[in-house]
Structures are given as structure tokens and as C-alpha cells.
Image (spheres, coloured by chain):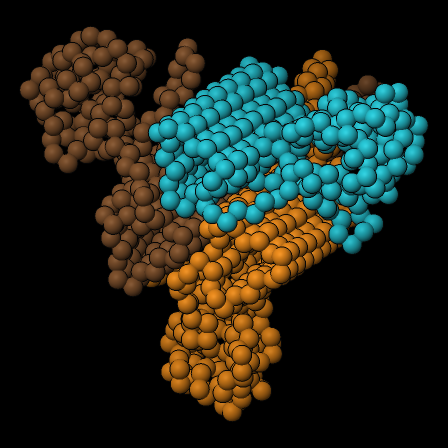
Chain colours: A cyan, B brown, C orange
Amino acid sequence: MKFSNPIEISWIASLINAELIGNKNDVATGINEIHRVENGDLVFVDHPKYYDTCLQSDASFIIINKAVECPAGKTLLVVAEPFEAYLKIVNHFNPFTPATTLIDPTSTIGEGTYVAPNVYIGHHVSIGNNCIIHPNVTIRENCIIGNNVIIQPGSVIGSDAFYYNTKKDREIWYKKMSSCGRVIIDDEVEIGAGCTIDRGVTHDTIIGKGTKLDNMVHIGHDVVVGKNCLFAAQVAIAGATKVEDGVILWGQVGVSKTLTIGKNAVVLGQSGVSTNLEGGKTYFGYTADEARKKMKELAWIKRIPEMWDRLNSQNQGTRD
Amino acid sequence: MKFSNPIEISWIASLINAELIGNKNDVATGINEIHRVENGDLVFVDHPKYYDTCLQSDASFIIINKAVECPAGKTLLVVAEPFEAYLKIVNHFNPFTPATTLIDPTSTIGEGTYVAPNVYIGHHVSIGNNCIIHPNVTIRENCIIGNNVIIQPGSVIGSDAFYYNTKKDREIWYKKMSSCGRVIIDDEVEIGAGCTIDRGVTHDTIIGKGTKLDNMVHIGHDVVVGKNCLFAAQVAIAGATKVEDGVILWGQVGVSKTLTIGKNAVVLGQSGVSTNLEGGKTYFGYTADEARKKMKELAWIKRIPEMWDRLNSQNQGTRD
Amino acid sequence: MKFSNPIEISWIASLINAELIGNKNDVATGINEIHRVENGDLVFVDHPKYYDTCLQSDASFIIINKAVECPAGKTLLVVAEPFEAYLKIVNHFNPFTPATTLIDPTSTIGEGTYVAPNVYIGHHVSIGNNCIIHPNVTIRENCIIGNNVIIQPGSVIGSDAFYYNTKKDREIWYKKMSSCGRVIIDDEVEIGAGCTIDRGVTHDTIIGKGTKLDNMVHIGHDVVVGKNCLFAAQVAIAGATKVEDGVILWGQVGVSKTLTIGKNAVVLGQSGVSTNLEGGKTYFGYTADEARKKMKELAWIKRIPEMWDRLNSQNQGTRD
């Protein structure tokens, strides 16, 4: 999330009651989680294991629970509870604003766009021209929908990320990271019925031009999908994965988080993808591998009994 | 889709600006995609690979992008862009009519039927007697629901088919085929919560009498399901597959397109069906095969290390 | 289901037109299906195969279709159609009450709780403090939601159980058991978008404190989930399974019915769980087994061709 204006870091320090170490006169331009952090951003870290990653990241301002050595040109904001401080900043700049009307008046709906009855559109949503938004669709705040987009009934655009701060030494292990990213859907995209597309945690979830989703497709937070992709029913893509242009995922495929699926790759139905996949090839199985290899494996499995028999007959032979 | 009245083919030719070859004085009774085409129908074809299939199909009128030889008794409608011509005809006879009310006044709701708050019912829907339509359900235009049907919350009946005209030499690879079929749900059917049942592309999707669907079941376009079937949660059935009477699909089963699952077949949880299945048997695995065979395969896999050891000890033996 | 007051068994006998055998002057305190039956309860049985189970259960009152010998201290209610009699009792004490407003006035909503537009809340629902109920959510009658609960858009709480009385010698094989249980969601729980949580058939479905569900998670009837569990997208848990505290189920995992998943177990993505799992371990595959065993199996499968080659070369060797 970028702030609408740069913010004095001293002001933020006083908001979260932090001790400042290092460069105290800088301005912050945004706040992001560690995978998406950019120069000018705040980031938080609350476990020594990740101190170095955060200190050496592009973040300019590190909210941290120990007064470690500050890298040159950066600023530490030392607090007892970095996650709570992070939440306080996010909620200050991006507060949850409860809607009271089905279609928030701050949203804009393009010419020729049809919004069916029972559609919810949160605040500051932008929808382009000639779209069809079917009944019982939910589009949450700040999402951006291009032109000629179709969203079939019951789908949810901009649900919160499934992303928690985890600590198993407290009563509630998982504390919710407020999602302050958006969903951006490009032109000519179609979203099937009953799909859910999570917003980014601090950045954006993006669906590229001309991509088509069948029903009940789940797209996790911060996923970036290219152009002209085709995802069949019940596909699920976990957080922050990148799917390049022209990828086809057949029904019930699952893709793990933070992976890259290369251009024009095809993944056959029910496959489970747990590694990066090179483009231009066809994959299959769990964990997904090149389809021709996997097909051979399946054929070999069927030959085990034959091997067993031969092994037995040889055994017989050598014993004679 | 059948037209409400037969239409002069010369009139259609002028609508889509086509050159007529062959029988120019006939009347068309409907329009269908190639898998569902009947005598009296229009069909379209835009790739030489499929010319023969369409010319030799039951279609009486072929919208085509080349002036090929016309089979006896048929009519060609030659245009530069057959898919766009097809869309123009479909949209002329079955235009998208945006609803402005939650329950369209052209729909009929039977005696004793309860429609909960927040249910959307599109135009010309027919719902029988003694049904329960739970909240946040969407029933789109022209669908037919029998008697004693229960539809649980959030389900979608009559969403568009996931069916596109594909050409990878243009900017947008996938262009949407307008779905002009319906969903027909017979008596005593129950649809779980969060299900999606796509309408037929040009024909109907049918759910037979007494069939019960658990939550989040996806039924693709033009699927025909028999009587007394049982589909557990998160089952997905792809387009134009036929499921005969009494079939049981356990949780998360996926069935590929245009298959036939025989009467009283049982498919165990998470199986992936990619071939026709004979009735009366139990299936399992990916790709699904008879369960007792698959169970043996799993048992054999566990014995590979034992085979390896024996192979090693023999090796030892023969080398001695 | 417990009755609000104890009911004379003679009164129930006349309601369902039953012949009473055994203790005729007792009072019933509730009605439950056989897996959940307690002392003071009615239960029904209509197949000789299950007579003994029901007669020897904790049920005090057995609705049965044959005048068998009555165990001491119990009561038989003999009727021709026990299932229909059971339904009549359930529907008498827990009739379906069609809502006419989006938020039923008999429901209570705690302080600081935000209910978005287009949310349906049935009768006698209780929602705690500081909850966020997002748009297009359905919460059906009698469900109980704790404090600080978030329910994301389109989710369904309290849908009917997928639970039928099955008889294949009648026209309609599957007859619906009316679900008279509830869903109880404890404090600090988060339910993702497009989830469905079925109510208990006669008891309650329970989600423990601090548990977090991603999108499109399906929880079957009478499932009991412990504290601080994490279920990723498209997980499905079938009826009456118990998931202990701290369990993690990754994306698209399916768990079969009436199982127990032990404390802090982790099940990797797409696994299919068909047996009880001991706590504290990581599982994988279909059917799910300890991950390190399954990983070895996958590695062994890849070595089959090598074994084949060695087998062939030995064969060669022994023939020489």
C-alpha cells in the first residue's frame, strides 16, 4: 500500500510509540509485507530469524522488536509488538469503512455496464464500460474492473487475504494481517460463478486481459495472472504465485504459493503444482511433472506385478 | 436453441450478410453447437479441420467461411466470420435482458413454494410447487425447476457455459459463446449450498428426479444427470457429460467432459474420471479405474522396496 | 435436538400413531440420530440390520417398524414407517419457519458488530460483539456466532446436512432428514469467502476458538473443529468428523466422515484422509499416510524402470 502523501517517519513513530534509530528525518511513502516491499516502504519484523531479510530488503523503515544495528540510510522503529504497530499504521491509513448501501456512491460504473439486483459494490470501486455484473456478486472496496468484463453470479472480488501473523505461545495463534491491497481485473476478463479472488495483503492481485475463469475458481492474495489464461472449474491458486500469459489450468488443479507458471504451460486436471513450471509444456500429477513422464510412471506401476513374477521365476532359476 | 417460429433462411442470410449456396428457400427451426445439432438447425464452422464434421452433421444450415461444395438438401451461409455471425443470430433471438427487479414478473412460482429474501429469479423462470429456495440463491432466465425441489443458500442455477471460440492469432484468444440453453431441474431434487449449475450452450443442462447434490458441486453446461444420483461436496462435472441413474460420486470427484458414467456406478472420493465408466461398478483413483484394481496397485507400490532388496540379494547371489 | 420441555411419550405416540411397548409413562427430552443419541432421547430404526444398535444405544425411546422384545427400562414406539414418524416429530418441534425479512427480529447482534448490506440472518441467531459479517452471507436459523468473528462474502452458515434416509425399492431413493442441529462458531474465528458450514443433523457443528478458514471450505454436518486450526482453500470435511486443536489442512484436502484428526496434525495439499490420523505428524497423499513414507513411495516409483533394467540384465546373466 502506498500512502496518498509521503508521511514523516517521526509522525509514524509517535503513532505507534516507537523509538527511532538511524535516519530520523525521512518520509515514508507506503507500507508492505516483506515479499512486496519497495524503497520508501515500512515493513515489520518480530522474529530474529527474519531480522536480516528485513534489514537487507528494499524497505527504508523497519518496525522491529530489538534495537539492532541500523543499516546505513535506513531507519529502525523499535517497539515491543511490531505486528500490532504494523496493524495500527495500516488501519490508520486504510480503515475499514462499513458500507450501508448496496452500491457505494463513491464508486464509478462505466457506460453500458449492467449491474444486476443484489450486487454489492464497496467504496471507491471502479468498473469500466460494457460489463455485466450478475446477481449476488460482491465487489469489495478499492477494486478496479476494466471494460467488457463479465462476473457471473455469486462471485466475490476483493475478499481478505488468508494471511496471519503466527505465534504459538499465545492463546490465539493466528492474528489477521489487515489486507490493504486491491484486486485489478483487466479488460475482456470473465469470472465464473462462485469464484473468490482475494485482494493483495499490501499489494494487488491482478487478472490479465482476456483471461477466463470457470466456476468456483479461487485466486489467492497477490497472485498475478497474465493474459489469455484459461482456468477450469475449482482451480485454486495460493498466495503470491505468478501465472504467465496463455496458461491453461484444467479442473481442480491446485497451485502452491509464490511459484511461477511459465508462458503457455498446460496443467492437466486435478494436478497439484508445488514447484515452478517452465512454459510451453504439459504437466500432470501430484506433484505435477511433465505429463509424458508421469504417464510413463503410471504405466510402470501397472507392470510391478509382472516384475514380481519375473523376480520369483529367476529366484527359482538361480536356486535350481 | 429452437426458435419460437421457423425462420426463412433468406432472412437470416440478410441478418448476417451471408451469401447463400444450395437450398435457398428453406426455413430454420433452431441453432445449436455441433455436439447438439439437429435437423432444421443452423450450425457454424470457421476452421477447415471441422468443415466435414459440420457439413455431414444433422444441421440443415452451415455458416461457413469458405464457399465449399454444398451437400444435397443443405444450405451454406458464407461469411468472413462465422462465429460472429452465429453470435449475432443467438443474440437476436435470445437477447440478454437485464433484470431490474429481484424476482422478474414474467416468472411463475408454484403453490406452497417459499422463496427466501435475497433470492434472484430472472425472466421466464418456472418454479414448481412446494419448493424451498433459500437466501442468496440466483436462478437465471428461462430455467425450469420442478416440484418439491430444495435449493440451499448461495447456489447459482443457469450460469453461462465455460465455452469459448478459440483463436490464438488475435489479441483476445477466447471469445465467449453466448449460452442460450437452460437448466431443467426435475422433481424432488436437492441442490446444496454454494453449487453452480451452468446452462447449456445451445441445449439444456438437466438434473434428474430425486437426485441430491451436496455443497459446492459444479455441474458444467449440457450435462445430463439421471434419477436418484448422489454427488458429495465439491464434485465437478465438465461440459456435456452424461451421468446415468443411481450414480454416486463421492467428495471432490472430478469428471471430464463428454463422457458417460453408467447406471449405478460408484466413484470414490477425489477420483478423476477421464474415460467412460461402465455401470454397476466401483471406481477409484486418477485416472479412475475399478477400485479393486487400483487398491492392488497401491499395495504393489508399497512392495517396491522389498523387490529392490530381493533384486540386490539375487545380484549378490549370481555374482558369487 | 433437545425439546424445550420434557414431553410425555404417550403424547408423542399419539402424534405419530404408534403402539407403545415397554415403559409407557416416561418423558422424552430430545430426539437424535443414532450417532448422537443420549439418554432420554428418541431414535428411529427401520432396518432389521440396525435394530440391535438402536435397542442397545443410549436412546430411551425407539421408533421401530416391528414389535421386537423391548429392553428393560426402554420404550418402543411401533409404526409402519419409522422415518416418516421421526420427521413428523422433528418438524413438529422444529418447524421450518420461512423468513420474510433479511434480518429476523428474533436474532440478536452484539455491540460493535457490523452486518453488511445483503446479509441474511434467520430466526433466533445470536451474533457476538465486534464481528464483521460481509455482504451476501447467509446465516440460517438458531446458529450461534461468538465475538470478534469475521465471515467473508458469500459464505453460508447453517445449511442443511447432506443426510438422507435411503431405500432403493421406492421411486425416490433418498429422503431428506430434516436438520435440526445448529452451527456454533466460537470467538476469534474467521470464515473465508464462499464457505459452507452445514448444521448438525440433530446435534451441533462446532468451530473452535481462533480457527481460521480460507475460501470455499466445506464443513459437513456435526463436524467438531478444535481451537487454532488452519484450513486452506477448498478443504472439505465430511459429516461428524472431529478435528482436534492446532490441526493444519492445506489446500484441497478432503477428509472423510466420522474420523478423528489428532492434535497438531498437518495434512499437505490435495491429500485424501480416509482413516484416523494420530496427532503431531505430517501427512500426505491419497489415502493420506505419513509424509515421509509417501515421499519415499514416490521416489521408489521413479526407480521402477531402473529395477526393470537390472532385472533384464540379470536375466541375461543367468541365461548366459
Residue A97 picture quarter: top right
Q: Which residue is drawn at 39% across and 15% down?
A: B167
Furthest-bottom residue in this view: C25
Q: Which residue is drawn at 45% across and 60% down?
A: C164
Q: Which residue is drawn at 33% across and 38% down?
A: B199
Residue B162 versus residue B75 in the image, above or below: below
User: What x and y, as percent, mark residue B248?
Assistant: 44, 48
Please count the marks in the image. 0
Q: Which residue is drawn at 64% across and 45% down?
A: C231
Query: Is C300 on the left or on the right of B180, as rendered?
Result: right
- Look at the image and tell me in which quarter the C terminus of chain C lies: top right
Q: Can residue C203 be seen in this view?
A: yes
* Depth check, front residue: A15 or A248: A15
Q: Can residue C272 be seen in this view?
A: no
User: What x and y, as percent, mark residue C44?
Assistant: 48, 73
- Look at the image and tell me in which quarter the N terminus of chain C lies: bottom right
* Depth check, front residue: C158 or C264: C158
Query: Is B78 on the left or on the right of C87, as rendered?
Result: left
Residue B200 picture quarter: top left
User: What x and y, as percent, mark residue B294?
Assistant: 56, 38
Residue C304 versus residue B271 in the image, above or below: above
